[in-house]
Image (spheres, grey):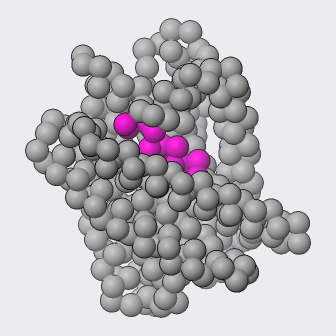
Amino acid sequence: MTNSATSALAAAGTRPASGASIKNLPVNLFAAVMGLSGLSMGWRFAHTEFGVPRVVSDAIGLFATFVFVVLLVGYGAKLLRHPAAVKAEFHHPIAGNFFGTIAIALLLQSAVLGTTCDSALGHALSQAMWIAGTVATLLLAAYVVSRLLGGNCHPAHAVPAWIIPGVAALDIPVTGSHMPMAWAGEVLLLSAAVGSVLALVLFTMIVTRLIQHEPLAPAMTPSLLILVAPFEVGFTAYVNLTGRVDLFAGLLFYFGLFLFVVLAPKVFRRSVPFGAGWWAISFPLAAMVNAGLKYASVRGAVPLKVVAGGMLVVLTATMFVLAVRTVRVLFTGRLLAG
């Protein structure tokens, strides 16, 4: 196996089992916070539109916050005890893009906290988290673009994880449309511009690589669903910025749905081993479900609402399975194996 292939497997969170250590905590586990936060937002929408008890979304949101805190403490310990490992992960051409999951988790948690904790303190904390997530997202996007423009990027490194910084920028208008700061509107426009163009360029590069080069390693196969995220997150960002679900918004939603139908059979196969990399499917699915719920509520068609509600139930079951399997590999020592 080549060095690049070995690194790719490591980035996907799949390593040969030896000694468990916090040094091997993969940054892409923060995708779990993204998926759970998106699930909470989906059930919150179901509460406002369909009368589902609010306790469901609040419970999932609090669980997402708990997972976020645990991962922050764990990765903070890794940074303090193994700074060289964190530095290597950050500068890796594939794994480094997963640091965008931390920024997205901050942004999504700001939205979850703003609705779950309806108090002055909760809103202040939500705004602080959104600002921190926005700054981190834009800085990471600038760093990634600067690195890419430096040249000498191997074509095999153009994997779906590359698009995460672009999706992160699109999440700023997704989560910040109700921020009260006078300057927030301009930041939303800046972020939408950065995210949309980055997503378009990187999506093209990734699809070209998938067509012209060898298939992804099996452990990285779940990350294919990340390609759905720019269109579904873009849908919500566009709707939040314009205040309407128009023809362009519908095109974004339906193309994301089309990509999911194409990619799902490639991902959900018994031959794909389970690892932390499987959490890469959670946020694209959550983004698609939230977009579907919004689209169905505006169109008003009963079949669309039934399909969107069914998608939310399937997403919930998927999150449950991922959580159970992750806990299992954690206690068997495989999650943190080196």
Residue 172 on image: x %, y %: 56, 67
Q: Is residue 185 left or right of residue 269?
A: right
* Range covered by the magenta-colored residues: 93-104
Along the line of sight, the residue nearer the viewer: 49 or 127:
127
Against 243, residue 105 (above or below) is above
Against 2, residue 41 (above or below) is below
Q: Magenta includes 97?
A: yes
Q: Is residue 155 left or right of residue 138?
A: left
Instruction: Determine which quarter of the picture holds residue 127.
Output: bottom right
Q: Is residue 94 visible?
A: yes
Residue at (60% x, 81% y) in the render: 185
Q: Is residue 233 visible?
A: no
Along the line of sight, the residue nearer the viewer: 202 or 142:
142
Residue 112 on image: x %, y %: 69, 63
The mark tally for this picture is 0
Against 269, residue 7 (above or below) is above
Helix, strand or loop: magenta stretch: helix
Residue at (49% x, 30% y) in the render: 89
Instruction: Determine which quarter of the picture holds residue 248.
Output: bottom left
Q: Residue furthest left?
A: 212
Residue at (73% x, 35% y) in the render: 73
Q: Magenta includes 75?
A: no
Residue 53 on image: x %, y %: 72, 71
